[in-house]
Image (cartoon, rainbow, N blue to C red):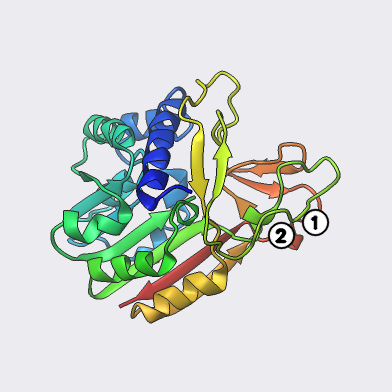
C-alpha cells in the first residue's frame, strides 16, 4: 500500500510526461494565444462572463497545467494572476507560453494542498478547471485550502468532469456501463496508461505511466465547500465534455463533445460558483 507522498510523486511524474505529450502539437491552442494578443483559451472563454470586470482584481488558478487558461485572466485586466501546479514541467512550458504571449503571470510549483504556504496574499477569484478533483484524495482539505486563499467577498469557481461521467468503463462496445465507484474510496484507482486524453496518434507516449485517481460525488464536493465556509451560488450540470473518451459514441460541437445518441442521459461536466 502506497503513502500519500508516493501517490503524488507518481502523479507528478505522470503529469510531467503529459505536459510533453500535450505540447507536441497545438492541442491547447497555444499558437493562437501567442500570436493573437486578444485571444483567450476556449475553455476560459465559455465562463469569462461569469467573473465580471476583472480590472484590478487578483486571481489564482489552481492546478493550472500549461497555464493556457491562466493567461486569459491577465488579458482581461486582472492586476495579479497566479498559476499553481504540481507538475514542474508543466510550469516550465507555462512560463514560456506566458512570456511569448506578452503577459505577466506568477507560476508557483506546489501541491494544491500546500498552496496557502507557498503563495502570499489573498485573492478575489479562486479558479480551477478542468480535470482537477480526480487527482486529489481529500476533498475537505481541498475546500479548506480554497477558502484560505480567498479575500472576504471573494468568489470561487470550478468546472470539472462530472463524477457520474467518471464511473463509465472504457469498453463501450456494448454501450455505456457503470464500472467505477461514484463515491470516494479509501484507496485510489491506480492506472497504467501511456496515453493522455488528446486524440493524436502521433503524440509521444507517456513513460511514467502509473497514476492514481479518486472520484468524488457531487454531494461530497458541495458539502465540503459549505463546511469550509462558502456560500453556494449555483450548481450546473451539462451534457458535454471537453475531451472525447469514446470516439465511436461522441460527436464534436465547437470545442466540446456530446454523446451522439440521447446526450441527456449522462451528465459530463458540472459547474459550481460560490462566494466567501
Report whether 92 appears left or right of 271.
left
Residue 8: x %, y % from top left: 38, 46
Q: Residue at x 49, y 41 (%)?
A: 211
Circles 2, 1 touching at the beta carbon (< 8 Å)? no
Quick one: SS at disc 1? loop
Report the disc number at residue 262. 1
Q: Would you call the spot at circle 2 few (<14 residues within 10 Å), some (14-19), or many (20 or more)?
A: some
Residue 194: x %, y % from top left: 55, 28
Which is more toward the observer, 206 or 52?
206
Residue 186 to residue 210: above or below: below
Q: Would you call the spot at circle 1 few (<14 residues within 10 Å), some (14-19), or many (20 or more)?
A: few
Report whether 39 appears left or right of 219.
left
Q: Residue at x 44, y 47 (%)?
A: 2
Asked if residue 79 can be seen in this view, the reply is: no
**Residue at the extreme left of the image, as rendered:** 120
Report whether 222 appears left or right of 105.
right
Residue 19: x %, y % from top left: 40, 32
Q: Quadrant of the C terminus?
A: bottom left
Residue 141: x %, y % from top left: 35, 67
Which is more toward the observer, 23 or 218?
218
Asked if residue 118 can be seen in this view, the reply is: yes
**Residue at the extreme front of the image, as rendered:** 1
Residue 75 to residue 138: above or below: above
**Real-space Cα distance between discs 2 and 1?**
8 Å
Q: Residue at x 50, y 54 (%)?
A: 134
Which is more toward the observer, 146 or 99?
146
The residue indicated by pointer 2 is: 266
Depth check, mark 2 against mark 1: the one in front is 2
Amino acid at each position: 500500500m502506497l503513502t500519500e507522498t508516493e501517490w503524488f510523486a507518481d502523479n507528478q511524474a505522470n503529469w510531467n510526461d503529459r505536459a510533453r505529450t500535450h505540447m507536441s502539437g497545438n492541442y491547447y491552442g497555444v499558437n493562437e494565444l501567442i500570436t493573437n494578443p486578444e485571444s483567450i483559451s476556449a475553455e476560459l472563454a465559455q465562463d469569462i462572463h461569469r467573473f465580471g470586470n476583472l480590472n484590478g482584481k487578483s486571481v489564482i488558478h489552481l492546478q493550472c497545467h500549461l497555464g493556457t487558461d491562466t493567461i486569459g485572466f491577465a488579458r482581461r485586466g486582472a492586476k495579479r494572476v497566479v498559476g499553481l501546479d504540481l507538475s514542474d514541467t508543466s510550469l516550465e512550458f507555462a512560463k514560456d507560453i506566458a512570456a511569448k504571449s506578452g503577459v505577466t503571470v506568477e507560476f508557483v510549483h506546489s501541491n494544491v494542498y500546500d498552496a496557502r504556504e507557498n503563495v502570499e496574499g489573498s485573492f478575489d477569484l479562486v479558479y480551477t478547471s478542468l480535470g482537477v478533483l480526480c487527482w486529489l484524495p481529500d476533498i475537505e482539505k481541498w475546500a479548506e485550502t480554497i477558502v484560505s486563499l480567498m479575500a472576504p467577498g471573494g468568489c470561487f469557481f470550478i468546472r470539472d468532469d462530472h463524477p457520474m461521467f467518471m464511473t463509465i468503463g472504457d469498453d463501450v462496445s456494448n454501450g455505456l456501463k457503470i464500472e467505477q465507484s461514484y463515491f470516494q474510496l479509501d484507496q485510489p484507482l491506480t492506472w497504467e496508461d501511456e496515453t493522455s486524453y488528446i486524440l493524436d496518434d502521433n503524440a509521444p507516449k507517456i513513460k511514467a505511466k502509473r497514476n492514481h485517481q479518486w472520484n468524488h460525488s457531487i454531494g461530497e464536493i458541495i458539502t465540503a465547500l459549505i463546511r469550509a465556509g462558502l456560500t453556494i451560488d449555483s450548481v450546473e450540470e451539462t451534457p458535454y465534455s471537453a475531451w472525447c473518451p469514446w470516439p465511436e459514441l461522441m460527436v464534436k460541437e465547437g470545442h466540446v463533445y456530446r454523446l451522439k445518441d440521447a446526450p441527456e442521459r449522462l451528465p459530463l461536466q458540472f459547474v459550481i460558483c460560490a462566494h466567501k
